[in-house]
Image (cartoon, grey):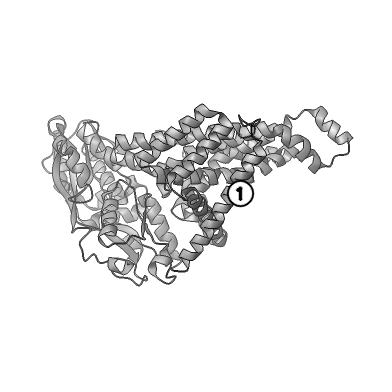
Amino acid sequence: MIKMGIPKIPLGEWVDSFVAWLTIAWAGLFTFITNLIDGLLKTIVDVLSVGPPIVLILVLTLLVIYTSRWPLGVFTLLSLLLIENLGYWDSSIQTLAIVLLSGLLTIIIGIPIGIWCAQRKTVQNIVTPILDFMQTMPAFVYLIPAILFFGIGVVPGIIASFIFAIAPTIRMTNLGIQRVPNDLVEAANAFGSTTTQKLFKVQLPLATPTIMAGVNQSIMLALSMVVTASLVGAPGLGADVYRAVSQIDVGQGFEAGLSIVFIAIILDRITQNLRNPAYRNAIKPKIVFSILALLVLGTVLFVTLSNNNENTNKDANGIGAQTGYEIIGIEPGAGLMGLTATALEEYELDNWTLIEGSSAAMVAELQKAYSKQEPIIITGWTPHWMFSAFDLKYLDDPKGSFGGAEGIHTIVRKGLEQDVPGAYKILDQFSWEPSDMESVMVDITNGMDPTEAAEKWVTDNPDKVSEWTNGSQKGNGEPVNLVFVAWDSEIASTYVISRVLEQNGYKVTLSQVEVGPMFAGIANGSADGMVGAWLPTTHTEYYNTYKNDFVDLGENLHGTKNGLVVPKYVDIDSLEDLK
């Protein structure tokens, strides 16, 4: 590639500095927003969860019948019963609550901004490019600063969903008001109407169908974000889909995906017909919606009183109360998450919740808590650079739930030795120490590109590299496809071995995937190998599933460890202290 020779503009560094400043300067505001959204979401979940599932199923069925006629009501009844039967009712409640809260935020904020745009051309000219940016920027990007601002969990997912989904509400509100016939506006002016009277008596009533279409689209966009939000710990059907992808569980993925489809259809039909219900002539909408509002308000009051009684019985000074009874985890498909779930059962820690997300989100939450000297409990493993960056300790595991030391294995597809014998031999002889891996991880964490960090380590350790390449046949541009998961340890090892293979004449392609697809890809021959199989515990489920379809070349690193980790300033030493 021919480069222009112009120095790179440090745009990323500027953004990082700005976000870091915001995180500190506006910490109080972010904490307030986090607590507010958490409280609202918990209230919505509690309201939707009152009584057995059949109560909410019947309420939604009757609402759909009233707004969209009885055939769709029958569909609603059957689909919700199927969701409950499949075991996704609790996840559906979480997803429905997230979508409702996101939709509520888009209405509260989006409609006023749309009105403002319709009344002020200058405002429209400023807001329109911002909306273009918000709609075209990949939704994943919103999650990065959201994690730093609001922590791991459902709040950053809701914020990202809100940003992604608000544009249609603003645009359609603006469009609906602007399309009100001018003669009606002039007639209102002729009768001496004020701006407020004209807005609420003429423009908004006539623009309501267009505004509702925008709200409908915003709700659908918010629902489409549930899987993305699960990457930072948002619960619900999105997390079930994410877990199914990680574990290559086609059945679970189909069931959870089908549940999302059912909820999307129900919400879409309700919001489309909310203004003009199908049976409005039989029962006036004011009566139906008044009854529904009273039912919701009564349930909220009941839930609030119940929660207040529960909170008075909790120890506000214990480690559980200080951390919200949450353990910050990583990807749902990781074996470490399964070990942690087992540990919670064996130690009878029923009050604790294991938060699913990603390793990057977990580290971001650790950094945020550590900078404030706040207690936090995370799932941890070594080697990992965070033990060099922070003063951490493992919690003792007297019951041995997390097992002993593990090794990281190199696994390749069948036939690789015959197809590319030189690359096979290098992979077979690849072996290094935890300290070697940690040095690469630290360089990457400090801002060095993984390729540059790998090149630096390879240059600084020629003797070790020569042991890997000893007796191997030089390549002649043969392709080698390595797969890895986005864990810091696997990024380090994969980039280092890929650099060694490239120096020996092979054309290496790196593919970042989830754990399940990593094993499946090697088993079916679509990938050539990996150097990140944690055995015998972390990846044992995947290993046992595909062990007859690949070749295990043995350990490339020994001495790994899994467990629950806390900063040393946290005054607990064992998993038993969590009781």
* Above or below: residue 425 compared with residue 394: above
Residue 402: where, in percent of width, then height? Answer: 23, 58
Residue nearest the observer in this picture, 148 or 119:
119
Q: Is residue 462 left or right of residue 448?
A: left
Residue nearest the observer in this picture, 515 or 318:
318
Residue at 27% x, 40% y is: 516
Residue nearest the observer in this picture, 99 or 366:
99
Question: Crowdedness of circle 1 by 10 Å Cα count: few (<14), some, many (20+)?
Answer: few
- Corner quadrant of residue 470: top left
Residue at far front of view? 282
Residue 483 seen anywhere in this rendered image of the structure: no
What is the three-letter code of the residue carrying label 1? Leu
* Above or below: residue 380 compared with residue 190: below
Residue at 46% x, 49% y is: 49
Residue 279: where, in percent of width, then height? Answer: 61, 30
Please give the count of numbered marks on the rendered protein.
Answer: 1
Residue nearest the observer in this picture, 427 or 365:
365
Q: Secondary structure at mark 1?
A: helix
What residue sits right under mark 1 in the picture? 294
Residue 500: where, in percent of width, then height? Answer: 23, 43
Q: Quadrant of the N terminus?
A: top left
- Corner quadrant of residue 349: bottom left
Q: Is residue 135 left or right of residue 407?
A: right
Q: Quadrant of the C terminus?
A: bottom left
